[in-house]
Image: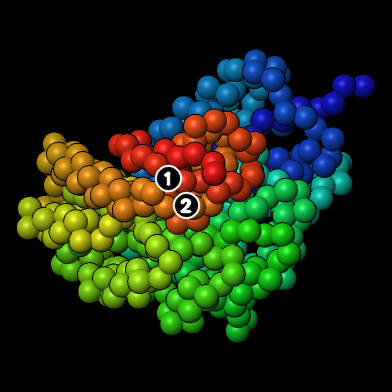
Amino acid sequence: MSKKTYKVKALGCRTNQYEAQGFVDQLTEQGYREAMPGEKVDVLIVNTCTVTKGADSDSRHQIRKLAKQHNSQVIVTGCSAQKEPKIYQEMPEVKAVVDNENKEKLLNHLYPEDKWPEFSIKHFKAHTRAFVKVQDGCNSFCTYCIIPYVRGRSKSRPVEKIVKEITTLVQNGYKEVVLTGINVGDFKDGKKTLADLVKACDQIDGLERIRISSIDPDDIDDNLLDTVINGKKTCPSMHIVLQSGSDTILKKMNRKYTKQLFFNTIQSLQKHNNFTFTTDVIVGFPGETAYDFDETLEVIKRVPFAKVHGFIYSKRERTRAATYPNQVAPNIAKERLQVLLKTAQKQAFKLRENHVGKTQKVLMEKDNFGHTENFLEVWLNKRHKPNTIVEVTLEKNTPEGLYGTVG
C-alpha cells in the first residue's frame, strides 16, 4: 500500500515556519511522505500571514496555486485566516479553516481516526539553523500592528519542553537554533525569564550556536545582556528592532523605547566580540515628516548594521494607526524606502570591510555559502557539506558579502 501524501506551506514569520515544520514532523512520523509536484495530496496545509495587505493577498494566491497544482482542497490556518475566516471559508479551494488557538491540534481535530504525535519539531527542513518557537502572542499593541488581535495575548512554552525539543534537534544534527516568537522578549515561564531560557540552552551538549530572534531594545535587561555576552554558545549578533529613529514616530507607534534607549542597548553590546546587529525599519508611517525620516537615516548611519529590513507602512484595519491623519503618499514612502536601503547597504559594506583579513568560523548552509557567528554572509572558494562549521579566512568584500577560503 502506497504512503499517504502531504504538502505544507508557510508564509511570513519564523513562528509560522516553526509551526509548519511541526505539521511536517507529525505527518512524517505518522507515515506520510511529501507529495511530488503535481501529485494529488491527502493533506494540504497553508499557514497564512497577515502582517501586511500584501501578505493577505499572497496567502490567498498560494492557496489557489497549491490547490490547482495538487488537485486537492486546502486546510487553511494562520493569521490571515484568523483575521478574515469567512473569506477563506468561501473559497472553493478550501476544505477547512482552523483558528490559531487550535492550530497545534489541527491534525487531531480533522483526522481523529489517526493517533497523532505531540506537536513539536525534530527537524527543520531545508535549513541548517532551526527556528524554535518559545513564545506566542503579544501584549504590546503597537498602533500599526494587527498581530495581537489574531495571535492573542502573550504566552510562553515551558523551559523544559523547549530544552527537550532543542536536544532532539541537536541529536538530529542541527548545530544552531534561533529562539523565536511573536514577541520573544515577553518570554516568561513562571519566574523564569528569557535569560534563564538562554542559560538552559547554553548547557545543551552538542549545540554550537544560539541566536535570539527579533527583540525590542527595552526587553534587553542587564541579565539578558550578561547572558548573551558571556554565554558559551550565544552568538555575538542580535536582531534589535528600531522601526523608526524619530521619537515622535516611535510614540505614535506605541513603541516602549526611545532612540536613546536603542543607542544605549547597542553600545552595551557593541564593545564585545565583534558584535553585529540587524534591524527592522518602517517608513511612511502616518505623519512621518521628512525630518522624522532623516532622523531614521541618522541612526542607520551611526549604527553599523549588518542588514536592515525595510518596509513601507501597510494600513491594517482595526489598528489605531489606520485612523491617523496625514497618511504618507505611496510614492514618497517608496522613495524613502529606496534611500533607506541604499544607505543601509553602504553601511553594511563598511562593516564587512573591517572583517577582511580575519579568520572566523562559518556554518555552511548550502553549496559554498554560510554565516559567521556574528551573522556576516560568506561565500567560499569551494563547496562544503551543509551544516558543518569551517574556519575561514575572509579575503575579499563585495556588495553581495564576504568571500573567503578555508585555511
Q: How crowded is mark 1: few (under 14 residues within 10 Å), some or many (20 or more)?
A: many
Determine whether 379 is above or below 164 in the image.
above
Identify the mark nearer the N-term, 1 or 2. Answer: 2
Q: Which residue is drawn at 36% across and 44% down?
A: 52
The type of residue carrying mark 1 is: Leu
Element carrying mark 2: strand
Residue underneath mark 1: 394
Q: Is residue 347 left or right of residue 196?
A: left
Q: How crowded is mark 2: few (under 14 residues within 10 Å), some or many (20 or more)?
A: some
| Residue 126 horizontal/vertical position (percent) | 62, 37
Q: Residue at x 59, y 69 (%)?
A: 232
Q: Which residue is drawn at 81% across and 27% down?
A: 4
Residue sitting farthest toward the right: 1
The one nearer the camera, 366 or 79, is: 366
Q: Is there any visible trace of residue 82 in the rendered image? A: no
Q: Which residue is drawn at 28% across and 45% down?
A: 349
Q: Is there any visible trace of residue 403 in the rendered image? A: yes
Residue underneath mark 2: 359
Element carrying mark 1: strand
Determine whether 4 is above or below 111 in the image.
above
Q: In this view, does 34 lie to the left or right of 348?
A: right
Q: In this view, does 16 lie to the left or right of 144?
A: right
